[in-house]
Image (cartoon, helix red, strand yellow):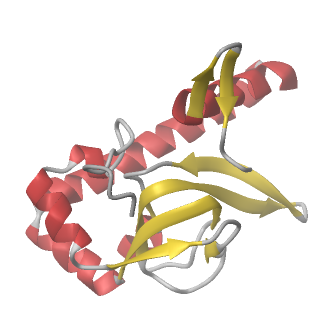
Amino acid sequence: MNGSGPPTWAAGSFLARLSPEERDKLLTLGTTRLLAASKRIMVEGDQDRHVEIIRQGYVKVTTQVGGASRLLAIRLPGDIVGELAAVTDSSRIATVTTCGEVVSTVIRQADFVNFLGTHPHAASQVTGTVGRRLRWANERRSEFSAYSAQVRLAHVLSDIAAACAEKVRDGLRIEVDL
């Protein structure tokens, strides 16, 4: 990993909401790996059940609709992906692909579920994470019937810029390779 100090988790991310002790214990359950750009780490419909914690970099979450890939979300350092398949014992509901190099920790379903069973605060944070994502999705669905495509695009770009952009002389630059 970067070696230039302690990791920085995105504000409001899953890891940011855990205590340092919970974070350390959870991350030691898995295997940390460096992933190349454009690597699919989860595929919609697959039956695998592991979770991944994004430690550095960004991933995009997509789904197939009408034969085309549709962007659902971007996940940031500290975010968890794959938690629904792990806790519901169901197939993947989306594809997760790296946007540039990513460092993630892979945790087996059994280890993750056991951890949640012995760490109720962490379990409540998984529930909160899913709830916040559902709220965000409901807001986007509501906007679909209320606003034009241009306004909806502006909202999505604003969300991406707030999460992933860096300030430059003339404004903001989104560095995530979508």
Foreground residue among 33 and 110: 33
- The answer to whether residue 90 is left or right of residue 59 is left
The quadrant of the picture occupied by the N terminus is: bottom left
Residue 63 in sight in this render: yes
Give residue 143's position: percent from left, percent from top.
70, 25
Residue 148 in sight in this render: no
- The answer to whether residue 25 is left or right of residue 146 is left
Seen in the picture, residue 82 relative to 9 is either above or below; the reply is: below
**Which residue is depicted at the point 48% across and 37% down?**
135
Seen in the picture, residue 132 relative to 91 is either above or below; the reply is: above
- The answer to whether residue 44 is left or right of residue 25 is right
- The answer to whether residue 3 is left or right of residue 151 is left
**Which residue is depicted at the point 75% across and 22% down?**
154
Give residue 79's position: percent from left, percent from top.
41, 53
| Residue furthest right in the image | 67
Counting every numbered tag in the picture gives: 0
| Residue furthest front in the image | 4
Seen in the picture, residue 99 relative to 129 is either above or below; the reply is: below
* Quarter where residue 27 is shown: bottom left
* Quarter where residue 68 is shown: bottom right
**Which residue is depicted at the point 39% across and 41% down?**
10
Foreground residue among 31 and 122: 31
Foreground residue among 20 and 93: 20
**Which residue is depicted at the point 78% across and 53% down?**
70
Give residue 43's position: percent from left, percent from top.
65, 76
